[in-house]
Amino acid sequence: MEQFKIRASAAHEIMAGTIGLTENQEKILSEYTDRENGIGKPLTDKMKSELLDLKNKKNNPELPQGAKTYCKKWLKNRLFGRREDINS
């Protein structure tokens, strides 16, 4: 497979979105982790579930949807030898 290259004009397609946790999610994770460790009130069942989800998202970051879509399109173009026509 050839090396992945992208035109500068298409970089916006893979740069949109965030990978991992947002700033607000980081704050919530920190607060819930403190509460889990006995600092403050105990966690509710809903908070425990959300804490597990946040830990999973932090440990297994996912590409933004735009980047996934662009990579799929790029791979299909390379596998099947297609090239997108540019009209201007």
Image (tube, rainbow, N blue to C red):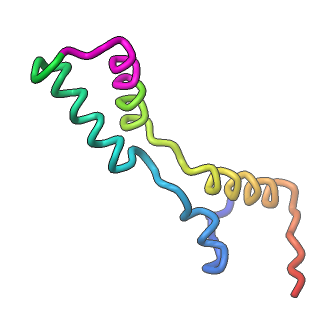
Q: Which residues are magenta?
A: 42-52
Q: Residue at x 66, y 73 (%)?
A: 10
- The residue sitting at the front extreme is 41
Q: Is residue 41 above or below residue 79?
A: above
Q: Is residue 65 above or below residue 33?
A: below
Q: Is residue 43 magenta?
A: yes
Quarter placement of the C terminus: bottom right
Q: Nearer the viewer, residue 42 or 13?
A: 42
Instruction: Estimate the x, y position of residue 75 in percent, counting from the top left.
Output: 74, 55
60 vs 74, left or right, is: left
29 vs 62, left or right, is: left
Q: Quadrant of residue 45?
A: top left
Main secondary structure of the magenta stretch:
helix
- Count of number-bearing discs: 0
Q: Nearer the viewer, residue 2 or 26?
A: 26
Instruction: Estimate the x, y position of residue 71 in percent, counting from the top left.
Output: 67, 55
